[in-house]
């Protein structure tokens, strides 16, 4: 396997790679379940700690805000 960085990497800087599941298309429970099953660890990434929403959820919230805005215009 070879990795190519898109920017300079400082000596000692941590280099990370995704395991696949992404918060935009899987819920926290789905991601953590997949990682637990496939890689045998409990994910503690920023998205899991912060409860990042899926893209679908973000779009739902966005469309609700638009509707509310129109209501008050
Ligand atoms: Zn995570």
Image (tube, grey):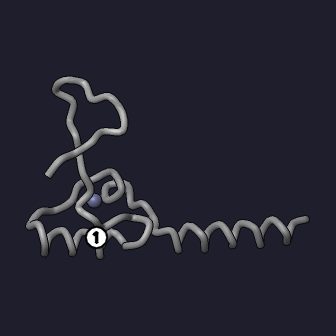
Q: Residues within 10 Å of mark 1 (few under 14, many from 20)?
A: many
Please state if 61 lies on the left or on the right of 38 as rendered.
right
Please state if 27 lies on the left or on the right of 3 as rendered.
right
Count of numbered circles in the view? 1
Residue 65 image point, x, y percent:
71, 66
Q: Residue extending furthest right?
A: 73
Q: Is mark 1 within 8 Å of ligand 1?
A: yes
In front of the other: 8 or 26: 8
Which residue: 42% across, 60% down? 52
In front of the other: 7 or 15: 7
Location of residue 3 with respect to 28 vertically, above or below: above
Query: Which quadrant does ligand 1 occupy?
Result: bottom left
Residue 17 image point, x, y percent:
24, 51
In front of the other: 43 or 71: 43
Q: Residue extending furthest top?
A: 11
Location of residue 36 with respect to 49 vertically, above or below: below
Residue 55 image point, x, y percent:
51, 68
Which residue: 65% across, 66% down? 62
Please state if 39 lies on the left or on the right of 50 as rendered.
left
Classify residue 10 by image quadrant.
top left
Disc 1, SS: helix
Residue 23 image point, x, y percent:
39, 64
Classify residue 36 by image quadrant.
bottom left
Q: Residue extending furthest left?
A: 40
Which residue: 85% across, 69% down? 70
Which residue: 91% across, 65% down? 73
**Residue pointed to by mark 1:** 31
């Amino acid at each position: 396997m070879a990795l190519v960085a898109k920017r300079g990497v400082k000596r000692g800087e941590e280099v990370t790679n995704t395991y696949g599941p992404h918060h935009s298309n899987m819920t926290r429970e789905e991601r953590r379940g997949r990682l637990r099953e496939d890689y045998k660890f409990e994910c503690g990434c920023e998205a899991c700690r912060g409860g990042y929403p899926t893209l679908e959820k973000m779009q739902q919230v966005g469309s609700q805000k638009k509707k509310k805005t129109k209501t008050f215009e």
